[in-house]
Amino acid sequence: MNSVKILAIESSCDETSIAIVENGSKVLAMTTNTQINTHAKYGGVVPEVASRMHAENITIVLHETLTKANLRLEDIDAIAVTYGPGLLGSLLVGVNFAKTLAFIYNKPLIAVNHLIGHIYANNIENKLEFPLLSLIVSGGHTELLYVSNDYEFKLLGATLDDAIGESYDKVAKVLGLSYPGGPNVEKLAKDGVDYYDLPLPVNDGTYNFSYSGLKSSVLNLVNKEKMHGHKILKENLAYSFQKVAVMEICIKVNKALEEYNVKQLVVAGGVSANNYLREQLETVCQKYNTKVTVPSLKYCTDNAAMIGAAAYYLYQHKIFANLDLDACSYLDICD
Ligand code: KG4
Ligand code: ZN
């Protein structure tokens, strides 16, 4: 097939990102406008502010991306967009923008699931090798999947309550760290030791995860120490929390590697930026001679290149969306 250039749009949370991706792996240009500094003032993403900022920025981000790639919209083969899951108002900005471009320039429209995008982020600098296990760890998701081939997903387990990224963010708040908490907790933990005894979530033998218990344990511990007039050793608490949070992941990954013979573990989502998690997963996978693939930082967190990478398979199979495409804030990976 000739070179296929997909213009991809991602606006599901607090990043307005547009990329042009060739043949599902070569990123010709990407611009990501992050709203983190604005939301940090509120300690988390404010949905109304996020959608307004997407609307303000999206045409600027488009212009910058086309300029960087030295391309015009006429040169693009298809328009891809994240249609869910995510914040409804934020998703709607991207979806309506994509529909408008597809209509005006008469291009096929491709609807991409954000979670599938995170998995295909691993196809940009490396190549997905099937069958594989995929671990999605983000602010909204903690999922383990068996992927036998392109777009053939079997959900093994998911979080029963909080997502791992969410628990990092909440623990960060308790420790007085700014949003987004994950990178700050990781940084603090580097200077800590395993001092506090935090319980591992009950292991029920399934692939499901649980993080609300761990979060409550941290909260209770902080309150108790305060009541007794003890000083919280923040570095140590960050270390002990991270150790248990990552152990929960490693136990399930180990179980899946025992059960499934796979070529690769691909890690996806914002928390995959965490070095401690990467190291621990490497250790588990070494036992099974399984390769671990993690995207570089700019493709770990929300970005449009991953949406362009995931859209390529849909383009090849002519799986196009209609102009009545709607945003879905709740969307399963298997939908
Ligand atoms: O995938 P993502 O950018 O957005 C979605 O949730 O879809 O993930 C954001 C999450 C936040 O909870 C953030 O705290 C977490 O990823 N995160 C990290 C790290 N970097 C980002 N968590 C732990 N360690 C990190 N280094
Ligand atoms: Zn994400």
Image (cartoon, helix red, strand yellow):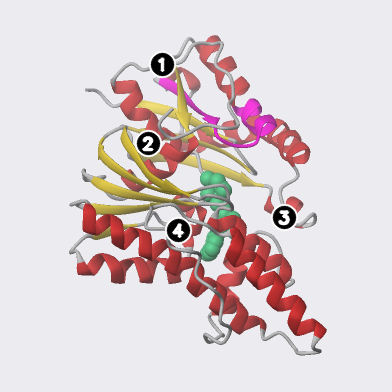
| Mark 2 or 1, closer to the camera | 1
Q: Residue 144 carries which label?
A: none
Helix, strand or loop status at disc 4? helix
Q: Please tell me which residue is depicted at 56% across the width and 76% down the height of the picture.
A: 198
Q: Residue 309 carries which label?
A: 2
Task: Specify the amino acid type for callout 3.
Answer: Asn
Residue 87 part of the magenta segment: yes
Left or right placement of residue 12 versus residue 261 in this view: right
Q: Give the range drawn in magenta.
A: 78-94
Kindly check if marks 2 and 1 are in contact, taking CB atoms under 8 A apart as contact.
no
Residue where numbered disc 3 is placed: 37
Mark sitting earlier along the chain (2/4): 4
Residue 219 image point, x, y percent: 70, 70
Helix, strand or loop status at disc 1? loop
Q: Please tell me which residue is depicted at 51% across the width and 12% down the height of the picture.
A: 105
- In space, the residues marked 2 and 3 are separated at their CA atoms by 28 Å
**Quadrant occupied by the C terminus:** top left
